[in-house]
Image (cartoon, rainbow, N blue to C red):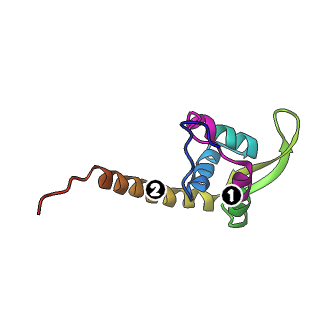
Amino acid sequence: MRPPGELELMLGTLDILVLRTLTWGPRHGYAIAAILRDSAAGSFRVLDGALYTSLHRMEARGLLDSEWGVSPRGKRAKFYRITAAGRSHLKNETERWNAYVAAVARAMTAVLKPA
């Protein structure tokens, strides 16, 4: 059960949010989830299963690279970094997302004109 006020991520938004997060530098999964949670002021939570599925899918598509390293807490972790293809994909998807948001906003504020 979601806490009151917590939003559910819309289908397709997790990949673009992860790519955006990785433009700030390589991160491991836990750090990505924390940045997303904090940047949205706790409005949504990224489930581990969804996050790692997204990371693995984008890595297979060449949008991300990864390497094993050590987290700030001294634990072994896989660090993900955005590739050139990932940056291009992020640019295209950001443009599509902005157009979608604008279209929804127009529809939500439309006034029916009498016939």
Residue range highlighted in magenta: 36-53
Percent position (x, y) of residue 48?
A: 74, 49
Residue 16 occupies quadrant = bottom right
Percent position (x, y) of residue 71?
A: 82, 38
* Farthest residue, direction left: 115
Work out which quarter of the rendered image holds the N terminus and state it.
Answer: top right
Of residues 101 and 61, which is closer to you in this image?
A: 101
Asked if the magenta segment contains residue 48, the reply would be: yes
Give the class, few, some or many, for how many residues have Cα within 10 Å of label 1's Cα (few <14, many ≥20). Answer: some
The mark found on residue 54 in the picture is: 1
Q: Amino acid at mark 1?
A: Ser
* Farthest residue, direction front: 1
Image point 61% across, 62% down: which residue? 85
Q: Secondary structure at mark 2?
A: helix
Q: Tell me: residue 74, above or below residue 49.
A: above
The mark found on residue 11 in the picture is: none
Image point 66% across, 46% down: which residue? 46
Residue marked by disc 2:
97
